[in-house]
Amino acid sequence: MAATFSLSRPLFLSHRPLLLLILLSLFSLCLSVPASASAKLSSPPYSAPRLQEAELNNPLSEAIRTFSRNAREGSKLWQAMQKRHVENHPDGIIPLITYLEMDDGVELFTNYWSIGSKKRPTVLIRSPYGPTSEDLALLFLPYGFNAVMQNARGTGFSGGSWSFFSHDWHDGHTTMEWIANQHWSNGDVYELGVSADGFLDVFQSKIDQPHLKGQSLIWTSGLPFLAAFQNNGAFRDEMTSLWLDLMQVSRPWIPKNTYLNTTLKHEGWDDFWALRSLQTEEFKRIKWPAFHMLGWYDIFTGPQWELFNNYNTLSDPSAQGKQQMVVGPRGHGSVSPRGSWKNWYPGEHKAEAWALDQSVKRFNDFAHWNEEELALKDELIDELEMYTLYVCGASDYFASKPPKGLGQYWTTIPSLPKVTPVTLYLHSLNQLGSNPATSKFPYEYVYDPRSPVPTLCGNNLFLAAGPCDQRKAEARDDVVLFDTDAFPGPVTVLGKISVDLFVSSNCTDTDFTIKVTDVYPSGESILITDNILRMRWKDEVREGTQTAKPIVPGQVYQVTIESWPILQVFEPGHKLRLAISSSNYPRFSTNLNNGNNVLEGGDPIVAVNRVFVGGQTNSKITLPTVNLSDLPRNVT
């Protein structure tokens, strides 16, 4: 039997603090009522203090609150509809709390909100963060959707053990079946997933989901392996270690570092990760439209770009061409330790309102709307194409001299513009040139794992995210720089930058890192993108079991390091800089150069690493350039 109560008037907007107090009281009630009212948990309950600690330590909590606020304030349709469907609804809002029994007997804490007695579609959020994502489901109440929020197994108030997403498609199926059979449901379910919540949504396609009609996937990915190991091998130390610690906050009885050690035992691709990733044939189960929101400096940009393409091309034909992407200039959410993103990128906050409105439009479930509301929808929702992208460029936030302002705006286009590859070769004298160097030349530097190059911004979670000046790191002896001449006109790059290097080391393993920066005329070197290659994992494998392979000391290897997708306008008078080194810590774990995996550790070895240019070892960088005119300023 579910514990229930009803509200005579809507509280979730005008009396939010009171509502939270009521919900927290209900959470406590559900943990103390007799078994006849609420099933007992199979593991110790998630306590309120632990819940509060997890909320305070989770950077996504503030990001979600900011997302919710910006969406409400930015969506004119939401503001109009919340008065019609919520504030003035004669039946009020009915929140309920229950435990749902899954197919293996584990019970998951679930709370849900229905409006009135009419059968309506439902927005479902399943999260490993406890109530962190709750606000986002409630955003859809004004549009006439029911809202269901559920703590994933082994997290929050739910029972069971967290299984690194390996049972979530079954739990999702059971939950959607339950929703479809409720008297307030019309049988249609739409999912919203932010960050780790989105992983749960993506994995629903591992089995048939007949009630699932649409998804909104925000700052997320369907590849946990690449969330833990960058570029198929380099451990994402800062993000993964701290995030896994955060996941254990609510389960203090589990030995410390259990989640971390489980991850590190699977440093290469194997069956553990294959189970937790969508295979090509599984994408064919996708028969619904989806909205995809990314950030150029997000922690999942590369994998989510790949996910969007797979949704658009590998899905059932009924879903192909019905995907929509918005890419803003953000990191993971709206939070950065260095201040507000609006100081760098004017108008960046519009993405939240678009995420809300375009998700509703993509869901296309308006049977419960009247003619006046349908007219409001057509009037107040922006018409966006398949791709809506923020065109990044030079910012006066970083420059001592104001830039020309060719970037820093939104564009919406039906397809990506034609790419013209531009190849620049690494030369002696630290130059990048359009012609290959004729004579072979080695750049040599010493990489000591005990003194790594410090991380300065980038696609981080707990560290400062986004762009910032790299000159402090570039001044080190273990960083090799290559610059273009000043560009005579604008150069616009859209897509993945590819760096082909000829390298060697005196060790059996080491790393090579790249950073691409925009060098201002006043000297600032602003990070655009970076990446890393761990040499023992240089051979990408997404089938079977990936095996670490030591390199031969002194042997020259040709390797390719691709960046994640970017969109950047290099203005006239600016330069492009390529920085090469062997560490970027703590963004990535330091390679000890001894051939051991991260879990084994061992004594560090100082590496003497070389990058070769010229002759038969023509290292190069290839830029995917587009015409700036193909990216019109057409979104106000």
Image (cartoon, grey):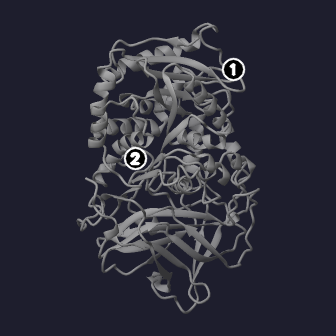
Where is residue 195? Give x, y as percent. Answer: 51, 42
In the picture shown, does residue 537 fall above or below 461? below
- Density class for disc 1 (Cα within 10 Å; few <14, some 14-19, many ≥20) is some
Q: Which residue is mark 1?
A: 42
Along the viewing direction, whichever of 292 and 579 lies nearer the viewer: 292
Along the viewing direction, whichever of 555 and 433 lies nearer the viewer: 433
State the quadrant of the N terminus: top right
Residue under the point 27% across and 67% down: 406
In the picture shown, does residue 463 fall above or below 543? above
Where is residue 103? Give x, y as percent. Answer: 70, 27
Q: Which residue is mark 2?
A: 336
Where is residue 247? Give x, y as percent. Answer: 58, 35
**Which structural element holds mark 2?**
loop
- Density class for disc 2 (Cα within 10 Å; few <14, some 14-19, many ≥20) is many
Taking 48 as reference, is 10 left or right? left
Residue 89 seen in this snapshot: yes
Residue under the point 67% across and 22% down: 43
Residue under the point 65% across and 18% down: 41
Residue under the point 38% across and 62% down: 469
Where is residue 538? Give x, y as percent. Answer: 67, 66
Which quadrant would residue 73 be assigned to in this image? top left
Which quadrant would residue 533 be assigned to in this image? bottom right
Q: Are marks 1 and 2 in contact (CB under 8 Å)?
A: no
Q: CA distance from mark 1 to mark 2?
A: 38 Å
Amino acid type at image mark 1: Ser
